[in-house]
Amino acid sequence: MNAPNPAFAPTRRAVLAIAAGVAGELALSFRLSGNTAMAQSAEASSFRPNSVVRIDRDGTVTLVVPYAEMGQGSLMSVAMLVAEELEIEPSAVKTEHAIGDNVLYASPLLGEQITGGSLSLRGAWKPMRQAGAAARMMLVEAAARGWSVPISSCHAEAGHVLHPASGRRVAYGTLVQVASTVPVPQDPPLKTGTLRLIGKTLQRIDSPAKVNGSAIFGIDVRLPGMRYASVMACPVLGGTLRRVDQAPALAICGVRQVVELPNAIAVVADHTGAARKGLAALKPEWSDGANASLDTAGLVATCDAALGTQGLIAETKGEPARAMSAAKTTYEADFRLPMLAHAALEPLCCTAHVRPGSCEIWVGSQAPGRARNEVAQALGLPAEAVQVNNHLIGGGFGRRLQSEWITQAALIARQVDAPVKVTWSREEDMRQGSYRFHNHSRIKVGLDERGMPVSWDHRIVGPAVMAWFLPGYFRNGIDLDVTGGAYGPYALPNLSVDFVRNDPPSGLMVGNWRGVGDTRNGFIVESVIDELAHRAGRDPVDYRRALLEPGSRMLAVLDRAAKESGRDGALPRNSARGVAILSAFGSHIALVAQVDMNEQGRIRVPRMTCVVDCGRAVNPGIVRQQIEGGIIFGLSAALYGKITVRNGQVEQSNFHDYPVVRMNEAPAIEVVVMDSLEEPGGVGEPGTAVVAPAVLNAIRSITGKRLLALPLDPAMVQTS
Amino acid sequence: MLIQVNGSKREADVDPDTPLLWVLRDVFGLTGTKFGCGVAMCGACTVHVGGQPRRACVTPVGDIGEQPILTIEALDGSVTGQALQKAWLAVDVVQCGYCQSGQLMQAAALLEAKPNPDDADIDAAMSGNICRCGTYGRIRTAIKQAAADLPLPARAP
């Protein structure tokens, strides 16, 4: 998922139209051509306008943003793209979250209304600018008509159309009625040359409401007469509810109702405090089901066994077998990555109101169109009868691509005669995740007499999430996400990548986690390459340099990172810098991590230097935020991230046993965003993928010991 | 029971062991204070009770008595709060923003206790507040900027 969905061949050209049926305003809608499946279904039901850009008579410009805002800056970035072409300021733009609708609001790169894969800005880049450009052209033409002057003698500036020859000037708002009768330009040209907004670090438009408590996240929705629920599913993954005595909960002040679902129990109350107290008072009896004896040791053993079996060939190049047998020496290693939770700070929460024949949902979702369809199916309603209102998200990281918790809220609400807000506890959020599953890899590299790789053999053992999540990324039994980036950005003459599918048992839900396939493979590839450099007696940067295409963007990024991080500057004993690089999501990134180790073998990471070439940075400030954030997220996983299962239950429950990096452990991070005029690349995920290898590579330099598993095992560091 | 929140008295008909967090959010509609962990491990629910930073998720509403409560919705009522909000915007700290109410309330308590915090003070005061977007570096910068911007009388200990 680090590249556009291969099932689609998007042209990324927007087909623009006037949104019908809205009086007294200019409302432009578009759909994206090239997405065959979506275009056909849209045509079948006639073109329904999605009103992406709306200009009211008072001049208010409203954008309906199809991408979820979960911190990655989609609202600001999309506003900047439209504002650039429409000749207004981003701060003058009002943004709304699009409702869930996979036809109207499909991502042009994923084929569905999904925010993920670091693809939002990449998908929005041209269509959103075209929408702004088309609106501007229509407003200019409307003004020119009114003044009876040639269109070419007018231009737009700061929310007005100007006719310099006569000094006349008219605000957009007064033009919208005429503009809405102007034919919509198709494939409107975009501005060239110096851009006014794109490329500038401008303050995010979503920030002011987030510093005074007025921003409304999904968890903050309030409706008249609403109830509040707390829910608990069977702690054994996949188990079911056998029976429960409801009386202890009903005795709690404020509790209204206990709702039983096949696999969960919910307490509905006047406020969440009473609901939580009521739930805690219950002693449900569960049927544990098939996973009653499931444990991490067994899951790991299954992965290890799979390492010994030949998988489906995902990719080959050259003559890997011949080159391997001719190699002077070989390097072999097995890598093991643990299960991970997303642990976003906003626990899962969904408000649902089920009425006869319809359902309305208020939520923060990364896939609201999918949520709508799944809720409709669960309730036996047509999709048109379900409305999903999307909201700000307090951290997604892939967890909110799933909708099972939204469906759960709808099923609870079906038994409640009011809108009900279902808030998961932190413990529920931790124990009922859609985890990043166990991932193991077996690496065998054939080396020549200089220690350079002549053959690269990478066996990938992991789940095929894409087989059900986005089948466009699943071909001939191969999950293209989990096998992506299996040999990094390196020009290797002979290679073989095979995939052994290892899905979790039913009831243990797995899914996408920030950085997707590249977080797993980036760790492995960059650990191996670094180890090979040490074994060849070469500097890790120089070794990588020799394996990168001369003149490539990746090489330029690595060189810049080596320079910026001051690699040549001396570090104290028991300190070292580790490097890791990645080309993915349309971006190129290099991270240098400094690691200090004390006498007891405890490590800290005081400093990171990161260089990124993400093509044209629409807002370099947001790019830096995303890289910094991705690094902290990756550092939490590298140091601590580990979900374990015992007797079918997830053992972790809160931030004491699933720790994350805090202020006192956060490194100083310097991010350099390279100047580039290339197409924008994604930045939400690459930062996460390079952290673990950079840190472990630094530890290798200090201790001489190569760590092959995550998270970092302090005992392994100390005994080295 | 009667509670004094952001300068006005409000009535809540709840059990006294109800955490303040749910009274603020669900009863009073002050949703700026966030739920993160329920066990005082993440700081998202930080408010001021009697001028001190407290985790609302583990503070029984019956224990508050006459102590005034300040939430993020009224942070701009003090010079310290205004300086912090201004710095937060100038540094563009915020990403998803979910933890930031708690971060700001914790930072306000820090500046009121220590008008010129150094890095160690910031680590000590702020490490109970988790940010999964990783805005820690920007928070540190913004706290220092706010401290520098505060007028001298407000900076007196």
Image (cartoon, coloured by chain):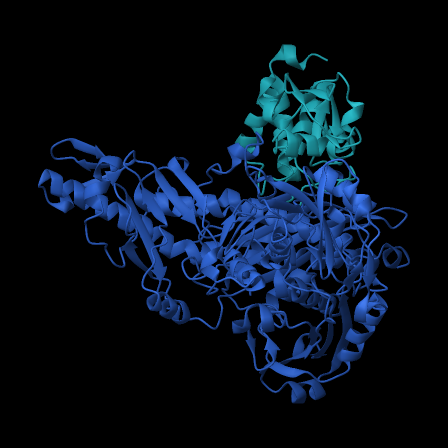
- Is A707 placed above or below A85 here? below
**Quadrant housing residue A173:** top left
Quarter placement of the N terminus of chain A: bottom right
**Quadrant housing residue B123:** top right
Please state if A342 lies on the left or on the right of A154 as rendered: right
Quarter placement of the C terminus of chain A: bottom right
What x and y, as percent, mark residue A601? Answer: 87, 50
- Is B120 placed above or below A324 here? above
Q: Which color has been applied to chain A in this rendered view? A: blue
Q: Which color has been applied to chain B in this rendered view? A: cyan
- Is A427 placed above or below B44 here? below
What x and y, as percent, mark residue A14? Answer: 33, 59
Tell me what residue is drawn at x 73 percent, y 19 percent.
Answer: B51
Tell me what residue is drawn at x 36 percent, y 46 percent.
Answer: A82
What x and y, as percent, mark residue A75? Answer: 47, 45
The answer, for residue A382, to whether it is visible in the render is yes
**Closer-to-camera residue (B127/A41):** A41
Residue farthest along the left direction in this orientation = A148
What x and y, as percent, mark residue A107? Answer: 45, 60
Please state if A315 lies on the left or on the right of B157 as rendered: left
